[in-house]
Image (tube, grey):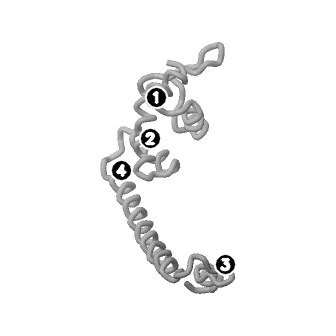
Amino acid sequence: MLIGELAKKINVSIDTIRYYERKGLIKPASIRKSGYREFDQNSVKTIHFIVRAKDLGFSLKEIRELLKLKNNPDTKCGEIKALTEKKLTDVASKIETLKIIKKDLTELLSECTDAAASVDFCPIVDALNRKEI
């Protein structure tokens, strides 16, 4: 199938497929003399894999590693598990950072009691100008 058919089949843009190609995540099954690239069912499966991994927060670098492991018959499930555990640790860390940011923003908002006050007297601006929040 050509790139347009592939894009429709898996509900991604043609540009997305081209991007994955440029990044070396997928390769066409063949290239016609006209230069048109043809993709096969394996391409469909690979792009589904990429999209799902991205939805779970994996970076393209991490996805490249997952694909490398997935396509190596000597890979053990534990290797994939280790990468997934690392991603989970990263996500948990980001969640904790976001909780701190949420708390700080909530505190900033609670300091603003006069929405009609001049920006010169805005406690949020004052707090952002301070070295510490």
Return the residue nearer the eye: 82 or 132.
Answer: 132
Residue type of the residue flagged with mark 1:
Ser
Q: Is residue 30 above or below residue 83?
A: above
Element assignment for label 1: helix
The residues bearing labels 1 and 3 have C-alpha atoms spaced at a distance of 55 Å
Proximity of marks 2 and 3: CB atoms separated by less than 8 Å: no
Return the residue nearer the eye: 71 or 112.
Answer: 112
The residues bearing labels 2 and 3 have C-alpha atoms spaced at a distance of 44 Å
Which of the labelled discs sits on residue 43, or is there none? 1
Residue type of the residue flagged with mark 4:
Ile
The residues bearing labels 1 and 2 have C-alpha atoms spaced at a distance of 12 Å
Q: Nearer the viewer, mark 1 or mark 3?
A: 3
Q: According to the image, label 2 marks what residue? A: 51
Element assignment for label 3: helix
Q: According to the image, label 4 marks what residue? A: 80
Q: Quadrant of residue 116?
A: bottom right
* Sequence order check, earlier mark of 4 and 1: 1
The residues bearing labels 3 and 4 have C-alpha atoms spaced at a distance of 52 Å
Find the residue positioned furthest to the right. Answer: 120
* Sequence order check, earlier mark of 1 and 3: 1
On the image, the x and y values in percent for residue 66 come to: 43, 46
State the quadrant of the C terminus: bottom right
Residue type of the residue flagged with mark 2:
Val
* Sequence order check, earlier mark of 4 and 2: 2
114 vs 119, left or right, is left
Q: According to the image, label 3 marks what residue? A: 119
Badge 3, how many Cα within 10 Å: few under 14, some, many 20+?
few
